Image: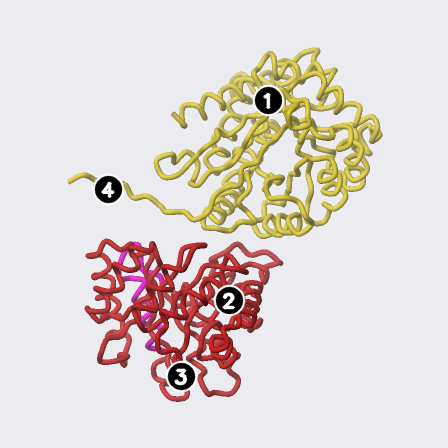
Amino acid sequence: MALEQALEKWTGKITEVTIGATREEGGTRSAKVVAGGESTLPFLTFEGEVPHQPVIAGEILDRYPEEWPSPLREAFGEDLKDPAAWARRWVEGYGAQLLCLRLASTAPDAGDASPEQAAATVRRVLEAVGAPLIILGSEDVEKDNAIFPKVAEAAAGERCFLGVVTKDNYKSIAAAAMLHGHGLIAQAPVDVNIQKQTNILLLEFGVKKDSILMDPTTGGLGYGLEYTYSVMERLRLGALQGEAQVAVPLILFPGAEAWRSKEAKESTQDSPRWGEQETRGVLWEILTGTNSLQAGGDILVCRHPEAAAALRRHVAELLV
Amino acid sequence: MLLVGERINGLFKDVAQAIQDHDPEPIQKLALEQTAAGAAYLDINTGPAVDEPEKVMPWLVKTVEEVVDTPLCIDSAKIPGLRAGLEAVSRSRPMINSTTAEPAHLEAYLPLAKAHGALLIGLAMNRRGVPKDAADRAGLAMEIVVAADAAGFPIEDLFIDPLVLPVNVGQEHGPEVLETLRQVKCLADPAPHTIVGLSNVSQKCPHRSLLNRTFLAMAMAAGLDAAIVDVEDRELVHTAAASRVLLNQVIYSDAFLENR
């Protein structure tokens, strides 16, 4: 007797979200990226549809990342001094199809770059590469509210995703995004209930469901990953069981999380018994990433090009 | 929780009058109001005054479908009425209300439901009437499940109704209904869905809304998936939303009352 495959029948489906707009759609991107659309748990292609591979994005800052561990800085060298060159390096050198620009220099206590400067940086990056763009502020509420209207206007029609917005601060950024044809990243502090509430607030404000990505905030391997994993899993199960408000793709930041860990930051010199730092840090990012994929991550923002490449291979192998 | 709006039923005087006058307006108003209030299905019943429901049912279905997309629950005690209603449905997947566990009924209704791709309500009763206790109700539910399985009807499209009786005449039935709901969930894997005609619990009682929503919360905790209700009773709809959250069926959010 043949063994019958026990398949779950899900009623829900993750909304498909498109990042980037080509010339025909009013933008200037050379290609767009589509995330979401799944009607089953991660990689279970025998059970439901997984129409799009999870996307591995490359992260860039608008300033030299002096605080980043040396393996990250060595991977990009001089290009780190210019966000446009850094963006080109990711796309042309390392095959990134999606970029995430963090406007770190706009932080009031670390540069305090003006909204106009931020907008100019965004324009330069958009002109340097054809890949779609995710744009993050400094997570300073007042400053983000000041820069995003200018940034959204400077990138009008490009269908960027702006973030982050939270349940306590979303109106000005969401209004700017809606006005100029962008999407939003809805963030909640490792809290499934607040994530749902944030999404509901955005939907009630008039943001379309296909213009929301959610960032449930994640921890790196060894730093709360197991807890954040459960939050992502609960959101995805809710979505597949028909809860429309949480049925949007997940964007996760394994690069930022992994390279915050002691295991990635400690130099070879200081801890020779831990092995070579670059290998260790890259592995930390890869493992944080593979776990994030298993939890349902649709977009992973990476920092080290080798980690990004390994995660891309991993996705391709799992989805064969 | 799937709420089925009960109001488009000839048992109600306004609906009976509208049917008699062939006046679509009151019917369409009820369809719109119940949909806005959160009905996932609308029950459609010509009522006892109509001798030939097959003549009225298509008009009722078309009248409702002109104004809403909400799926319909075709409710008739007579096969020709059901068939006419199902044939008139054009918008979405209908539900049939209802068969009993009586073999002759099952033989007629299961093929009808299959042919129309409809969901089917199965009452846990037979020609001897409503059983007294949970064991007999579950036994009849099992007969329905077995017949459905034999007919190739998907068990997850089946809604077992353990039959709620008015608390002022059949008080002892309350706990038996709750126990039946628990047992029905163990009959098969996947289990059949469960449904009740909720308002019956408070027939001719004062404080109907209180009795209805209290029993709804109890029944949901015992495994109730759907109920035919007065969806315009806000407290009741809110009780269903609160129960879904308390039973961990949906993710809690501060806006949980909007969760339908």
Residue A156's quadrant in the figure? top right
**CB atoms at circles 3 and 1 under 8 Å apart?**
no
- Please tell me whether residue A260 belongs to the stretch shown in magenta: no
How many numbered marks have been drawn onto this rendered protein structure?
A: 4
Q: Which residue is mark 2?
A: B240
Work out whether B251 lies above or below A127.
below
Give neighbour class at mark 1: few <14, some 14-19, many 20+ (Cα, 10 Å).
Answer: some
Q: Which residue is mark 1?
A: A31
Color of chain B here?
red
Residue A117 in percent (x, y) is at 82, 26
- Return the residue at label 4: A4
Segment tinted magenta in the rendering? B175-193
On screen, residue A256 versus residue B243, left or right, reads right
Which residue in the protein does label 3 denote? B166
Relative vertical location of residue A103 with respect to residue B218 in this rendering, above or below: above
Q: Which mark's residue is nearer the viewer, 2 or 3?
A: 3
Q: Are marks 2 and 4 on the same chain?
A: no
Three-letter residue code for mark 3: Pro
Chain A takes which shade in the image? yellow
Q: Amino acid at mark 2?
A: Ala
